[in-house]
Image (cartoon, rainbow, N blue to C red):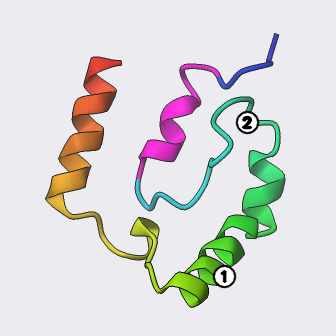
Amino acid sequence: MGLLVSRKDHPGHHQAPYNSNYCVVSGAWNKVLDESKFFRALEMALFLQFGVRPRSWNEPNSDWAEETEISNNQA
């Protein structure tokens, strides 16, 4: 029915560069929010406020990349 992200489309937010497809429940807003760079702006605002860099700004280190791969394999 298209109410939830399909299993085929869900892994898109687990893939480098980890800066798109944030709406993992329905996915209905992914295209609009990705094209408008809404989440990039939100990441910048949070970085400026709290000083924490999002993972999508750097190459993933092996610690959390392996964690994601294990999670994907178990799903």
Residue at left offset 67%, top offset 25%: 5
Label 1 Cα neighbours within 10 Å, binned few <14 / some 14-19 / many ≥20: few
Q: Could you say whether the residue bearing mark 2 is in a helix, strand or loop?
A: loop
Quarter residue 2 falls in? top right
Q: Residue furthest bottom?
A: 48
| Position of residue 32 measured from the top left corner of the image (x, y, whole percent) | 84, 54
Q: Which mark lies nearer to you, 2 or 1?
A: 1
Mark 2 or mark 1: name the one nearer the start of the chain.
Answer: 2
| Position of residue 15 measured from the top left corner of the image (x, y, whole percent) | 42, 48
Image: 53 above or below 31: below
User: Which amino acid, by three-letter code, is at mark 2?
Assistant: Gly
Label 2 Cα neighbours within 10 Å, binned few <14 / some 14-19 / many ≥20: some
Is residue 28 or residue 42 the one in the foreground?
A: 42
Total marks in image = 2
User: Which amino acid, by three-letter code, is at mark 1?
Assistant: Ala
- For the C terminus, give its image quadrant: top left
Q: Could you say whether the residue bearing mark 1 is in a helix, strand or loop?
A: helix
Residue 49, magenta (yes or no): no
In the rendered structure, which segment of residues is drawn in magenta? 6-15
Question: Pointer 2: what residue?
Answer: 27
| Position of residue 57 measured from the top left corner of the image (x, y, whole percent) | 43, 76
Residue at left offset 27%, top offset 19%: 74
The reply to whether discs 2 and 1 touch (Cβ–Cβ < 8 Å) is no
Residue at left offset 76%, top offset 67%: 38
Is residue 68 or residue 49 the one in the foreground?
A: 49
| Position of residue 56 measured from the top left corner of the image (x, y, whole percent) | 45, 67
Q: Residue furthest front?
A: 50
Q: Is residue 44 left or right of residue 12?
A: right
Image: 60 above or below 58: above
Image: 25 above or below 64: above
Disc 2/disc 1 C-alpha distance (Å) = 23 Å
Question: Pointer 1: what residue?
Answer: 45
